[in-house]
Amino acid sequence: MTFILAKALGAVDWFNGMPLARQPQNRYYIHSHHIFPQSLLYSELYDPNNHLDRKKVNEIANRAFLTAATNQALSNRRPEEYLHEVEERFPGALDKQFIPKNPDLWRVSAYEDFLEARRALIASKLNDFLNSLLVEREETQRRPVSELIAMGESSFIEFKSTLQWDLRQRKKNPALRHSVLKTIAAFLNTEGGTLIIGVEDDGHVLGMEHDLALVHNSPDRFEQLLANLITEAIGPQYNHLIRGHFESVNGEQVYVIEVEKAPEAVFLKGPQGKEFYVRVRTSSRALDPEQTVEYIQMNWG
């Protein structure tokens, strides 16, 4: 969850200054960096053979998210040496990763005080972020579909041009269904949301002509197809949290899917196995196993 929160708040890499959300792949993929290096803590404070000591060294409050290159460059440097350099080069970078600004806390001798201060910052930022999402969600729930489209995509609003009609190839493409399903799963795992099929990313209303043609122009068959896909890929136990209906906008039909937050973690059956998605601003992001465990612990205990 801290990684998602950091990206949502615009966290940047501490070497190249690029937002984490826009980092390239390969050697620049994101690492979980120990702010206080493990070797430093084990040599001066803790016993590497003690289970409780290892938990303190590796806890979330001692992690920041950086590219692999930056993580390697910082290596075993003391935070009291490099954190002020980061803030000088990229003002606000420490705030965006919830780093206490008091330099006295950057000393190894103050490590546990640093952890306590950073835990408080993470909790405060997380509460503010979740509260902002709830306010935004309440706003979207009260608006008609035409206004939601005019508002554009957000944490709670997503547009999909089609369910399974490939606009480029001009033919049916079942692989496109996964994009709709992962958005539904992400809404279930975050704070809910509204998915509108038949609308392009820029808000242009395409309508449902092509998708309906694939089911013999039967709205009932379309809804049954979608219900079957959700049941197979997400699970029938979540059907009561997902409601859909057709609606006319500017003379075109669109399909509106309202999703509520699930009371537990929801996994999507994907091409490579189970996948876990969450909503981060205007996109649905897959989390890796470590991030998934952290997110579940933070949200459902």
Image (cartoon, rainbow, N blue to C red):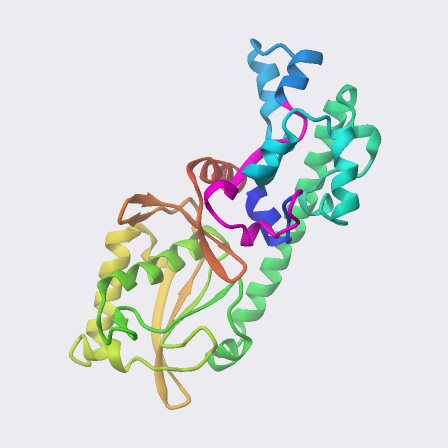
Q: Could you say where residue 13 lies in the image, as x and y percent from the top left?
A: 63, 45
User: In the image shown, does 270 or 222 lie closer to the viewer?
Assistant: 270
Q: Is 21 placed above or below 31 here? A: below
Q: In which quarter of the image is the N terminus?
A: top right
User: In the image shown, does 239 or 57 lie closer to the viewer?
Assistant: 57
User: In the image shown, does 133 or 208 lie closer to the viewer?
Assistant: 208
In the image, residue 19 lies in the stretch drawn in magenta: yes
**Which residue is at a point 59% across and 15% down the rendered structure image?**
52
**Which residue is at a point 76% across and 46% down the rendered structure image?**
89
Is 137 left, or right, of 189 in this rendering? right
In the image, residue 116 lies in the stretch drawn in magenta: no
Q: Could you say where residue 175 lies in the image, as x and y percent from the top left?
A: 26, 61
Is 16 left, or right, of 199 in this rendering? right
**Which residue is at a point 55% across and 47% down the rendered structure image?**
4
In this view, the residue farthest toward the bottom is 251
- Residues shaded magenta: 14-37
**Which residue is at a point 47% across and 78% down the rendered structure image?**
203
Quadrant of the rendered structure where residue 35 is? top right
Q: Could you say where residue 194 lies in the image, as x and y percent from the top left?
A: 45, 67
Quadrant of the rendered structure where residue 65 is? top right
Q: Is 244 placed above or below 277 here? A: below
Q: Is 148 placed above or below 191 here? A: below
